[in-house]
Amino acid sequence: MKDFKNFFTKILFDIAYKFPFVFPKWIRYYSSEYHSNSDYVKEAKVRSCETKRASLFDYPAYWKAISFSFTLNKEELTKLKRWRKKVSLNNYNDFIYDKIDYTSFDRSKGYMHIGRIGINKEDITDEISPIYLKSNYLDSIFITLSKYGAGLSVITFYFYLNKEASNMINSISIPNMEYFVRLDSLNLFSRKNRSVCLTDKESFAKDCIKKNMMEVAKEGWDLLTVITSNMGIKKRRDDIYCVNDMYLDQNEPYFVKVASNNTSGESILIPRYHHFLDVGLSDNNDEHFIIDNHFNIDLVDMTYMKVCPESTFTEHNNFRFRYCANYESHLAITPVLLIIKRIDALNDLIDNAKLYNKNISMGKLHSSLFHVLHDIQMISGWLSTLKKDIPYSLLAGYYEISKRIIERQVDRVNELQLTVKTFYGLSENRIQVSNIRYNKIYSLVVFIFVIIQVLLAAMTIDWQKKGVWYTPLIEYLKGIFN
């Protein structure tokens, strides 16, 4: 869509510059400033020649993996167990895998290795049937499951990438720019969208890096959708937490507070002096976490960076080549991040519920508030069990920070719960008042129908007939009126 906007804007401004009398005033102004032979476009073309390459970081990075984590309920755990049995290569271990859907509400049930899946290859250590598909970047998948109390279970699909993925973010060649101006909206008759976006080579280079990252991430998302569909599990994008794993073979830390001159001539998406991007989920200097949506692509929630010389790793504990589980690794904090994402979604849901709108449908509002209260109560239980159980799965350097994060989320949930309960009580009162009004109207309608029924019955009576039960009453009434 963006490419079409660029092309459309260029053609429109060039035509409007040559034939201005055909177009409205605002288009005539933009066309005079940004047509193909304008001073701005000529200078932008000259500046664009200065940057030929781009990278994600200041140093070459190894894009190790991309992981996807989400929660599973009891029914989905049963579906996972059936799928694991169906795709097993070796004899199915009933003792281990039959406990996949075994949960306990008041205590943790530990961690499980579900299996490894090879992509377009087979290995003697494979436990699950390999997957064959057209893929340029995916190597294999490592699946792990963590089960906590309060019905919280988190599964992680760890997609290990091949070296081609790293080539997509390191010193990539930037094509020549053809477009330097883009309309924000193609609706030329809209009074609200009459602005343009100016594109320079720096932002263009960063867009190229993001486009490459989207291409790699999309392969992972597409395969994840296939696997979960085979399991019979449906998840939305908002239900899944996606993490990029990056490794930089250099001295720690990556981020510094003093900017250094970029002598490479490359455009860097995440330079070293952008230390404010690190959200600091760990006290370890060799780990960085980037959650900023401006620097992450749409399909990724967080980028994890491991920064240390490879010589510091042991033979059997080399981060670059080791699969990571959602326990005893940086991914152990993922359940907390999933809950934060869930709370943010509830905040948006409450905003969209229009609590302060008196004209909103009472039934719709009451139903929305009930579902929000249900989710808040469930999340409150999850936070309680994580506060108790997650320290056993965290690495050194994570505990104190995760403890503070959980306490902050508990406060958020309590505030949400208080607000929603208040409006839920008001909603119940509105429904009760509405029921009273309805009952009054209903009673009046019933009374009217009773009167009508009596009148209709009276019309069928022969009042002149003698010797019947109502004759004395008729004679009495006649005497009164006479």
Image (cartoon, rainbow, N blue to C red):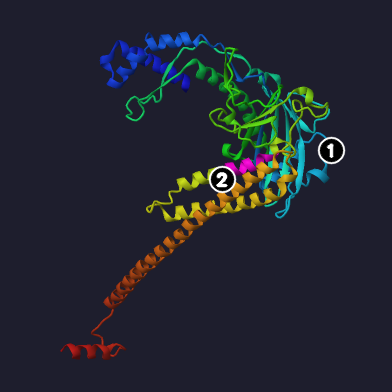
In the rendered image, the quadrant that contains the C terminus is bottom left
Up/down of 31 relative to 436, above or below: above
Query: Which residue is nearer to you in this view: 192 or 97?
Result: 192
**Is residue 467 one of those drawn in magenta?**
no
Q: Secondary structure at mark 1?
A: loop
> Which picture quadrant has residue 113?
top right
On residue 343, the disc is 2
Up/down of 46 relative to 107, above or below: above
Q: Position of residue 462 (x, y in %)?
A: 26, 81
Q: Secondary structure at mark 2?
A: helix
Up/down of 128 relative to 138, above or below: below
**Is residue 335 one of those drawn in magenta?**
yes
**In percent of the image, x 27 and y 20: which residue is there?**
25
- Please identify, in this view, whether the residue under mark 2 or under mark 1 is nearer the observer: 2
Give, as a three-letter code, the residue at label 2. Answer: Ile
Q: Is residue 147 visible?
A: no
Q: Main secondary structure of the magenta part?
A: helix
Looking at the rendered structure, the number of numbered marks drawn on it comes to: 2
On residue 91, the disc is 1
Q: Position of residue 421 (x, y in %)?
A: 51, 57
Give, as a three-letter code, the residue at label 1. Answer: Asn
> Which picture quadrant has residue 10?
top left
Q: Residue extending furthest front? A: 258
Q: Position of residue 228 (x, y in %)?
A: 66, 37
Q: Is residue 234 left or right of residue 45?
A: right
> Which picture quadrant has residue 155?
top right
Of labels 2 and 1, earlier in sequence is 1
Q: Which residues are magenta?
A: 332-342
**Few, some or many residues within 10 Å of mark 1 (<14, 14–19, 20+):** few
